Image (cartoon, grey):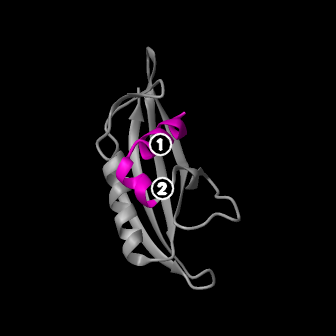
Amino acid sequence: MIGKVIAHLLKANADLLVIVPAGNIYPYVMNEDTHLPAIIYTIDSVTPGYDKDGWLGDECVFSVVTFCDNYTTLQSIALEIRQALELKDGTHEGITLRNIYLTGQLEGFNIQEDVFLNKQTFSTEII
């Protein structure tokens, strides 16, 4: 469910799409021949909440990973991703959620592939 929202919000950010084409934003894995920069998003966990009356909502944790061959561009993309997602709420793609929060960030470099990466982890609640 939340994957549709993530894709929608990322692809709705015009400033992000100037740097990363919409066709380079993928769920879970990018195509082998994808030209960088590229983004993948993954659902890390969904924890349902219940009370005596039934389902209250799901806490969702997801990650957005950027791959880029230039560190400065990587930083610009990470900022745009955060602006596209952080504190978004309401109904998107038929799914109602509460504020999206950035909960962590990790950077790295793959020397074998000569690629920089940035992983941002977010949390939200679907209601």
**89 on left or right of 19:** left
Q: Which quarter of the rendered picture does the C terminus lie within?
A: top left
Tag of residue 33:
none
On screen, residue 17 versus residue 114, left or right, reads left
Residue 16 covered by magenta stretch: yes
Q: CA distance from mark 1 to mark 2?
A: 9 Å
Q: In terms of depth relative to the viewer, which is nearer, 99 or 8? A: 8
Residue 94 sits above or below residue 74 on the image: above
User: In this view, which residue lies farthest toward the bottom?
Assistant: 111
Q: How many marks?
A: 2
Marks 1,2: beta carbons within 8 A: yes
**Magenta span contains residue 93:** no
**What residue do we see at 43% from left, 60% from top?**
19
Mark 1 and mark 2 lie on one chain; the one further toward the N terminus is: 1
The x, y position of residue 32, in whole percent, is 71, 64
Q: Amino acid at mark 1?
A: Ile
Residue at 52% from the left image edge and 49% from the top image edge: 22
Q: Which residues are magenta?
A: 1-19
Give residue 99's quadrant in the image: top left
Q: Quadrant of residue 3?
A: top right
Q: Mark number for residue 64?
A: 2
Pointer 1: what residue?
A: 6
Where residue 122 appears, x then y in whole percent?
A: 40, 50
The local crowd at label 1, few if under 14, some if 14 to 19, many if 20 or more residues have their Cα within 10 Å, is many
